[in-house]
Image (cartoon, helix red, strand yellow):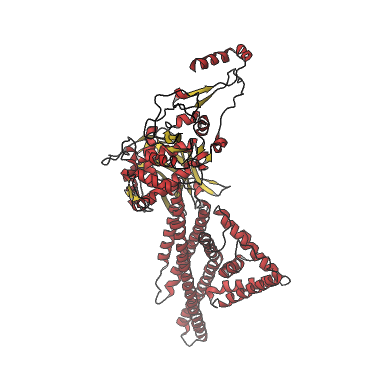
């Protein structure tokens, strides 16, 4: 373990563990010592540490169970005094250096900065490592030594039993020949009685030592059990929950490498303990027959408990490191990686066990999880489709110490759907990809499986938005330990807002999430109530139907479809302006008119809002002032196809005669950093073509603020609530730049292209 490598003879790890609380309090891992903390203070700190170590050693009881621990601490205290006798301050600096390195390893493993003492997560991680290291040390040396001592005592008892049997035989023979008064008979009787007394004493000591060791092993078992619960039911579950939320865009922070390190430590301890207890059981069975009143044997219960913990550890650490896609399209290649966290420690890879892949329905997942853990399950009984290339072998990767298998060419060929429930669509039906394997560790046989996160199977791309709604809801609101794949039908709006924000932030790729104003607008939309109070939405609940089944008023699409399409539009074409806060986006048409007609908004002030009527569209709303009259105009929405040809920033500069300030008063030039316009003086390309670019314009009445050269458009909107300015392909101008006549005469293709543009204009 990396932490163990920090410590050595300069400062033993055992001392670090025995004085853990005091050392952490005095040396504050991860924090710099004060500048005025001089050599005098360091010396005092070193002597305090040595005194603490002496006090700890003296506090350990003088009994056989703690003899080795007390002896070792005493020797380590003497060794530290000899080593640092001439320079005690060096001891304090050494301890501080070790503690800082340990804190750095913990922080690096968690992917964050060094955390000071007091950070809950860092403290838990440190506590798990510390407790595991103490237990490993006990099992590797102390209990192993105790078991070996009992073996030696047992051998000594066997030897004396053999001698006693020989004396008994000789005594009986001579007694029969010469009678009880014969001096050799008396002598042998004396030796026999003495040996019996010694043997009785040795048996008593053996049983005492045996029971002490048994109680100690039970204590270690309980400690290991507590650590395993923390690792599997808290840390590993937290990692799995993060992995599920990462499907909605969460950035994972839990370290799987930490969890593997702990699980490997648990596997080592459990296997060693189980071996030691089985050895003790053999010794007990041999010795207990000499007792007139045999003590009850509790070792089988301890072996069963250790076997249960080991089985739970092995089956619980067979995990999916890289999940298959949660929206899975038939006949489309996908990948997945499964990993056995304790595989390297238990040498599972030596047999290169097969891992097979199948897809199962929700009901089959329920049946599989309900089946008794001891029962042998047939993979053939759990299948709802056909997956190609679904067999792989677990291998050990020395560089990462991982036992895993990566499936790179999985493909779902067929799917068998179940009967639909009520109004449920096929995009709401959930499946799971199941990974199976069998292997043997020692005399223990394991059949393990693990289920992927819920999967929705589609056959066409137009089913993807609805399938993503199912997955988004499941990832966000599934409770751990649920019956597959039950989710609540209703959740609070605050929960939904958090899920939407996570999805949006991930898709747009920034830390600029949705604001409270955005959430309020979304609430008015999803609850179909434009007059909803700002605070009222916090107490509302949203149903699955409101989210993605029921169309919005006067629309043929749902709330989720609308949100999903504007999220994709922003992600693909407007990340920069959104991240800079230049896109208001989530604002109603009525609110946009109020903002733009408010006092202080000059002619040409504009804002960008997501269209209510056009899926995945964004419109430019701007104010036009004719004398004392202000009119708000809305440019026909731009969709993904439009913005892939001309960015929103370039479009704003195309309309610079109409647009001046971004609401409330930000100069239009702030969009220049996102402009990609081609310069007009570009010459012919290598193919002989004269480059061109598309430009956007709107047509409107001539006034003192508008461009006199702009022709009138009969579809111009005269005031808020009227028609929308049309912006389509017919309103895209071709800017062909300056033409060199000689170049045109020499380049036939360019000449033809130029004539085509003239005809178009």
Residue 617 coordinates in the image, percent (x, y): 42, 34
Looking at the image, the residue that sits furthest to the front is: 627
Where 48 falls versus 542 (above or below)?
A: below
Residue 657 versus residue 519: which sits nearer the camera? 657
Q: Which quadrant of the structure image shows residue 421?
A: top left
Q: Is residue 456 something that shows in the picture?
A: no
Q: Residue at x 43, y 68 (%)?
A: 285
Q: Residue at x 46, y 68 (%)?
A: 219
Residue 200 coordinates in the image, percent (x, y): 48, 79
Where 658 falls versus 121 (above or below)?
A: above
Residue 177 versus residue 643: which sits nearer the camera? 643
Looking at the image, the residue that sits furthest to the bottom is: 181
Q: Is residue 401 something that shows in the picture?
A: yes
Q: Which quadrant of the structure image shows residue 637?
A: top left
* Residue 237 in the figure: left or right of residue 9: left
Residue 611 coordinates in the image, percent (x, y): 40, 36
Q: How many marks?
A: 0
Residue 266 versus residue 652: which sits nearer the camera? 652
Residue 41 coordinates in the image, percent (x, y): 68, 71
Image quarter (top left, top right, bottom left or bottom right) of the N terminus: bottom right
Looking at the image, the residue that sits furthest to the right is: 86
């Amino acid at each position: 373990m990396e932490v163990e490598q920090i410590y050595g003879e300069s400062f033993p790890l055992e001392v670090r563990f025995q004085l853990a609380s005091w050392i952490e309090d005095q040396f504050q891992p991860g924090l710099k010592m004060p500048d005025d903390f001089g050599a005098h203070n360091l010396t005092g700190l070193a002597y305090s540490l040595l005194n603490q170590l002496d006090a700890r050693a003296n506090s350990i009881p003088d009994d056989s169970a703690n003899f080795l621990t007390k002896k070792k601490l005493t020797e380590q205290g003497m060794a530290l005094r000899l080593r640092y006798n001439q320079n005690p301050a060096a001891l304090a600096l050494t301890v501080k250096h070790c503690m800082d390195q340990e804190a750095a390893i913990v922080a690096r493993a968690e992917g964050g900065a060094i955390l000071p003492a007091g950070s809950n997560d860092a403290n838990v991680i440190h506590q798990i490592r510390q407790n595991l290291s103490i237990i490993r040390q006990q099992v590797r040396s102390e209990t192993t030594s105790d078991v070996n001592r009992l073996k030696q005592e047992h051998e000594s008892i066997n030897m004396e039993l053999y001698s006693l049997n020989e004396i008994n035989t000789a005594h009986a023979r001579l007694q029969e020949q010469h009678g009880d008064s014969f001096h050799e008979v008396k002598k042998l009787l004396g030796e026999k009685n003495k040996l019996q007394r010694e043997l009785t004493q040795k048996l008593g000591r053996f049983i005492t030592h045996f029971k002490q060791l048994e109680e100690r092993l039970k204590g270690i078992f309980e400690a290991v059990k507590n650590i395993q619960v923390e690792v599997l039911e808290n840390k590993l579950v937290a990692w799995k929950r993060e992995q599920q939320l990462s499907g909605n865009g969460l950035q994972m922070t839990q370290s799987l490498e930490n969890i593997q390190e702990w699980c490997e430590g648990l596997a080592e301890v459990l296997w060693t303990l189980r071996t030691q207890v089985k050895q003790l059981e053999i010794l007990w069975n041999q010795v207990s027959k000499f007792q007139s009143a045999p003590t009850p044997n509790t070792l089988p219960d301890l072996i069963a408990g250790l076997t249960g913990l080991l089985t739970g550890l092995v089956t619980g650490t067979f995990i999916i490191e890289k999940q298959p896609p949660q929206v899975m399209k038939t006949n489309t290649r996908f990948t997945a990686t499964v990993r056995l966290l304790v595989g390297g420690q238990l040498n599972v890879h030596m047999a290169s066990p097969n891992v097979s892949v199948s897809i199962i329905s929700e009901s089959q997942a329920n049946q599989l999880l309900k089946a008794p853990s001891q029962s042998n399950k047939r993979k053939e009984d759990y299948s709802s489709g056909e997956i190609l290339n679904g067999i792989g072998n677990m291998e050990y990767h020395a560089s990462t110490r991982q036992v895993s298998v990566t499936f790179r060419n999985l493909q779902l060929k067929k799917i068998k759907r179940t009967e639909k429930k009520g109004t449920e669509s096929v995009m709401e039906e959930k499946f799971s990809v199941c990974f199976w394997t069998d292997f043997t560790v020692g005399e223990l046989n394991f059949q393990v499986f693990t289920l992927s996160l819920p999967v929705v199977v589609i056959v066409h791309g137009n089913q993807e938005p609805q399938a993503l709604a199912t997955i988004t809801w499941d990832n966000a609101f599934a409770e751990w330990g649920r019956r597959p794949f039950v989710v609540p039908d209703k959740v609070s709006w605050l929960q939904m807002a958090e899920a939407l924000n996570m999805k949006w932030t991930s898709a747009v790729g920034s830390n600029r999430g949705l604001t409270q104003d955005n959430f309020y607008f979304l609430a008015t939309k999803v609850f179909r109530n434009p007059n909803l109070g700002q605070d009222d939405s916090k107490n509302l609940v949203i149903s699955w139907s409101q989210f993605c089944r029921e169309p919005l008023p006067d629309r043929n699409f749902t709330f989720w479809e609308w949100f999903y399409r504007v999220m994709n539009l922003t992600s693909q074409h407007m990340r920069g302006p959104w991240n800079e806060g230049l896109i208001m986006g989530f604002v109603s048409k009525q609110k946009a008119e109020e903002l733009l007609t408010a006092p202080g908004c000059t002619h040409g002030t504009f804002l960008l809002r997501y269209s209510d009527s056009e899926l995945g569209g964004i419109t430019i709303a701007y104010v036009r002032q004719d004398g004392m009259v202000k009119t708000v105009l809305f440019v026909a929405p731009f969709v993904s196809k439009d913005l892939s040809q001309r960015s929103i920033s370039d479009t704003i500069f195309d309309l610079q005669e109409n647009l001046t300030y971004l609401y409330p008063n930000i100069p239009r030039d702030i969009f220049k950093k996102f402009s990609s316009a081609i310069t007009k003086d570009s010459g012919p390309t290598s193919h002989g073509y004269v480059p061109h670019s598309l430009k956007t314009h709107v047509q409107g009445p001539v006034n003192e603020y508008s461009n006199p050269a702009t022709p009138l458009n009969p579809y111009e909107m005269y005031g808020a609530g009227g028609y929308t300015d049309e912006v389509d392909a017919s309103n895209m101008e071709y800017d062909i730049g300056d033409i060199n006549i000689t170049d045109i005469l020499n380049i036939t293709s360019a000449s033809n292209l130029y004539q085509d543009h003239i005809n178009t204009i």
